[in-house]
Amino acid sequence: MVVARSDYDTILRENLPVLDVRAPTEFERGCIPNSTNLPILNDNERARVGIAYRERGNAAALDLGFSLVNGREKDHRVNLWSRFLNARPNALLTCWRGGQRSEIAQQWLNEVGIEVPRIAGGFKAIRKCSLDVFEQVKSRKWLVIAGSTGVGKTQFLNTYRESVDLEAIAQHRGSAFGQLNIPQPTPISFELALAQRLLQTVHLGTCLVEDESRTIGRLAIPSQLYEAMQCSPIVVLEASFDARVQLTYEYYVRSTDAPNLVNALGRIRKRLGQERYEVVKSQQERAINQGSESLHLNWIASLFNWYYDPMYEYQLNRKLDRVVFRGDAQAVSEYLSHEAEIERT
């Protein structure tokens, strides 16, 4: 039996299921992708054990921990772990440093006939691995996919195996209207999931990534990757104005409830200017009240003309020297296929 595993790259890259026995507050601050929190000590128990450790030493802390979790409560927690592991035979076990908590959990599971390897060094070691991954990004080849709002950059990106969808990992679609109905991950969880995706694409040649600002929602792209993106060649994806408006409606607006649409518009009020804001607000209110797709397309078009397109043109003009190709989805696909063929020869 493998008691502990230290192949952290493989653990992340293969998205192995993980049984995390840390306390809930530890898990909430950051977690390994595909991990489930079934704590050996809850927050209150962990706090009491921590006080005992500081005041009376490790032996006293262990004695208190065993007295807090014994009998029926111990059986209950081991039963939860057993059910999780029986459904995931390739799962691993972790705590913060891969020390006493995961070792005790491993021992308790052995007592009921279940053997599970723990992650050597625990969550802390996986976190260090993720930071090491970011140190290597500048040595990789990147191609940035840029384009006006609504050209379908994310959809295009997701047709390529060798791509990193930063918005999906950040659980935010970018821009003021990009907030989803689920919370974004914590910064640590975001970076772990991003490191995982980087490991999954590391041997696939040039990697595609969407042109993004430094932050996606409230999360910041790690500086190493962001700096690599700022000096990489750019391919500009293009689409007609009407197609962009329609896609924006389908992707951002139709699935978003009215309060969130109103709040999103309010977030760009100052940048849009009061006069134009009032016009778009009025158009948006009519569209919401009448439930009309055509009226929604009107206010989206106004936002393109007055806000998103001028902002995009300004940003693109600052990096025109890095643009190597521009065209619609089919033309860009053909360009990428040609470049991939050259790269292979």
Image (cartoon, grey):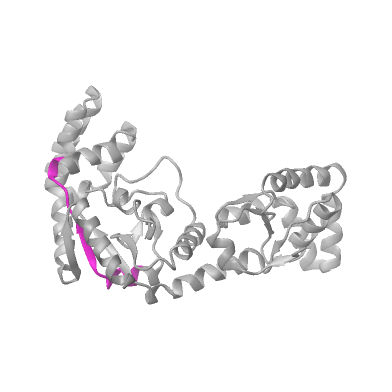
Please, which residue is most extreme toward the bottom here? 139
Residue at 27% x, 61% y: name it.
Answer: 337
Please, which residue is most extreme toward the front here? 345
Relative horizontal placement of residue 322, taking residue 75 as reference (left or right):
left
Q: Position of residue 30 (x, y in %)?
A: 55, 57
Q: Position of residue 272 (x, y in %)?
A: 17, 48
Is the residue 217 above or below the residue 275 in the image?
A: below
Residue at 23% x, 65% y: name it.
Answer: 234
Is 233 within the magenta? yes
- Residue sitting nearer the eye, 97 or 154: 154
Relative horizontal placement of residue 136, taking residue 324 as reference (left or right):
right
Q: Position of residue 81 (x, y in %)?
A: 73, 47
Total marks shown come to 0
Residue at 80% x, 52% y: name it.
Answer: 109
- Residue sitting nearer the eye, 20 or 13: 13
Q: Position of residue 50 (x, y in %)?
A: 74, 62
Which quadrant does the N terminus fall into? bottom right
Does residue 262 appear in this view? no
- Residue sitting nearer the eye, 17 or 253: 17
Does residue 6 appear in this view? yes
Is 213 within the magenta? no
Which quadrant does the C terminus fall into? bottom left
Give the residues drawn in magenta, as a range. 226-242
Is the residue 232 above or below the residue 101 in the image?
A: below
Residue at 78% x, 43% y: name it.
Answer: 79
- Residue sitting nearer the eye, 237 or 49: 237
| Image quadrant where residue 147 sits | bottom left
